[in-house]
Image: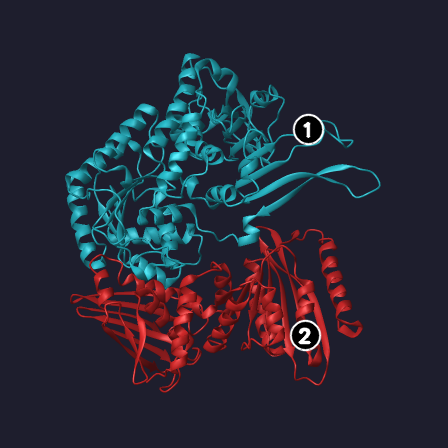
Amino acid sequence: MTSGGGASSLIAWLERELREIWAAQDEPGAPPMSRVCTMNLVVVAPTPTLAERYTPVVDDVTASIPARAIVASLDPESTKTSLEGTATAVCALENGRKLCSERIVLRASGADCVRVSSAVDALLVPEIPTALVWLGRVHADDPIFEDLAQSADRVLLDSEYTSLSSLLHVTAWARAQPSSPRVADMAWTRLASWHEMVARMFDEADAMPYLERVTRVSIAQASSAGARLGPEPALLLGWLATRLGWKTSRLGGALRLKRPDGTLVSLDLGSVPRPEGVADMALARVTLVAEGFEGTVERELGTGIEGTRDADTLLWRRVLDGKTMEHRVRLGANKAAKWLERTLHRPAHDPAFDESVAFAEHLVDDGLTVS
Amino acid sequence: MENPLRRGLVEDRTGDACAVVIFGASGDLTRRKLVPALYNLAVSRSLPNGFAVVGVARREKDHATFRAEMKEGVSKHSRRKPIDPAVWSDFESAIGYVRGSFDDPQTYVDLRAHLETTDAERGTKKNRLFYLAVPPSEFGVIVKNLRDAGLVEPGSHRPRGAEAWSRVVVEKPFGDDLASARALNDVFAGTFDESQVFRIDHYLGKETVQNLLVFRFANSLFEPIWHREHVDHVQITVAEDIGVEGRGKFYEQTGVTKDIVENHLMQLLCLTAMEPPISLSADAVRDEKVKVLRSLRPMERSLVQNNVVRGQYARGFVRGEEAPGYREEPDVSPSSRVETFLAMRVFVDNWRWSGVPFYVRAGKRLARRVTEIAIQFKKVPHTLFRAPDGGISPNVLAMRIQPDEGIALRFTTKEPGQHTILRDVAMDFRYGSAFGSNTPEAYERLLLDAMRGDATLFTRHDEVEEQWAYIDRVFEAWRAEANAPPPLYTAGSWGPEQSDDLLARDGRRWRKP
């Protein structure tokens, strides 16, 4: 259906379509259909191609988080001006019942792109949370982003596929809003395993004192040498620094990290070759060194066996007083749906994330690159 | 001191480094529940780096055989299928086996040697979680031998990362009556302090049971009406459609009262009736549950006849299949007087619940498998509408524990049309639909909590004793009736007629959940 009769007639048509889907009688013998909706999931893609590619991801997610999903694609440069839409039920079979989410697809071209936010707004289910997933780069002065983000409880992006500066723009914008929508980054969700593995190095009483004596941090990312520091490494460094009370200082313009006792912590930023299928600038290794202690978490890139090449293992290695321990943890398939689902499941307010992002702002200002 | 890197970790649910030592490792519980739960924790990266499982049992077998048995158990019973080869390979290397008799001190010498090797090779840090998956008659000898072999670290609750700890997890039934429960508590108290003893009631590990606290205390809507001014009565049902399933010998010793009512059902009652705890700490929650148990109106002998109904299933049909009577089951006496059904009218004599009856029932071979707590609210004080027979139905809030975990609120609405015709409808929330059905099993949560030293979802010594003190009086009354046989009910029904009479006398009736 197109908006030949105006956006409001498109919305009326979509609403009618949805009503008819639920009014339709189940086929005899078929599992009964139940409509389930726990949230509005609004996904905005900067191109129709990306929207098409991301729609199966949305369907995967709504199979476990039932929602009204609205996938909107924008094509502002198009010479054609139109707003089109379709509505359908997406069902998953659960214990003999079909549990169905609703999926609305909106395609906006040319000047009609400006209508997208108001069309989405009209299609939201009231009284339930709304999450906005913004797939493109974020420009806070973009009225479509601003309108949609203001009506959302959470704004999600993936800084690994957009940019660290997009994440910083969004967080800065969110801080300035009276409604204070929460911002989440799927790259941060992916770091959860890293946080856990790094924290494990210091869980035991005999290891914990070394945390205050760290003298060197090495971080490597999957990229060519000379590339700028990626979002995952920057956020991990931000997390470490804010947990341990490290501050930044400059000497001759060079960034330095200082422990609470004033001792400097040297920072090595390196790169490793990026195997095919692994995202550019993905975090590859972190090593913490203190006298008598060395702990490393390393992603064994490209060892995936679960259908995606980057479903890697993390190797955890610790040398404590000359004694080495090693452990491997499977990260599992690196699927977009998994990260979106996990991000939606995490608490909306995550102070560690906010603090790490604030720290990462310093790193962006420094224009850090890896060797 | 806490590890600062753990501050604010959203997914911080990892156990402390430890060896989980399972006594009774050849049993069904180990193969069906415990090891699959530990494997699932490995999949979700909740196990610590320093981790090992040590099975202890009498049967002769080597590590490889034990591992193969556990792999088969995980393949069949884990909620995550198929087994992930990478995770299993890592997990399997942590599994070991020690053969020996529980009353033979040599077993514990061997166990100690094995654990010392494990500490050195796997970094388990001398932390031990002893899991007693054995009958209570074995608890005493195991605890004594553990102590004599120097395998128990003294002391109480320690922060994470502190010195080595020892904890013991015990399966129900915890005792057979108040005296034996006290005796068992004494067995543990002689070696462990209370913070080291984790008495499992696996019902408390179920998501829906934990959600009871969230539902009551995180929603401002319900708590103001959660008392005698608004609640007419409460019904708690723990119904199974299966029979004793080859456990006739066990059931002849327990019956439904000791198997279900004394523990699971009483816990559900406590969580429904308790006051808000001052925090979610283990003792704050358990203090409130104990207060409920102490507020229960004692079931004096004279009250039992009018407030307690027992029953035993006779031949019938369940889900369309013919089912034998209890006395026809293997290992059951043909003249057995063991109850397979119990219904009670219970009063919580405190400010909140004064005069509100709690009707509770549990049984085997009932019409369907369902566990639920239903709060029936009072009727409207005045009927404005032409109502069907019996007036307007009261609102009911039903919390289903299993299956189809969820919450349903029944209320009255008008049917569309020219006339004001009232009709009951339900707002129905189901966990499986809203959050997916792949939620952690109760044993996963409970094992992880025990590894972390969090006893909130475990039963404290005084809770167990209060539960038994209440139930003992019922048994005393039955003994005074010269152990009269329980009335029979047809398999596939909702219990004996007397159960319906129990509510009918109050002008009420059981729900058909």
Q: Quadrant of residue B1?
A: bottom left
Residue type at mark 1?
Answer: Pro
Name the residue at the bottom extreme.
A226
Chain red in the figure, letter: A
Position of residue B397 in the picture relative to residue B176 (left or right): right
Residue tagged 2? A107
Dot 2 falls on a residue whose secondary structure is strand
- Residue at the (64%, 39%) spot, across then down: B410
Rendered location of residue B253, percent (x, y)? 38, 26
Tag on residue B381? Answer: 1
Q: Is A371 placed left or right of B489 in the picture?
A: left
Q: Is residue B456 above or below residue A302?
A: above
Chain letter, colour cyan: B
Front position in the image: B101 or B379? B379
Viewer-proximal residue among A180 and A300: A180
Q: Residue at x 58, y 74 (%)?
A: A53
Helix, strand or loop at disc 1? loop
Q: Is residue B200 visible?
A: no
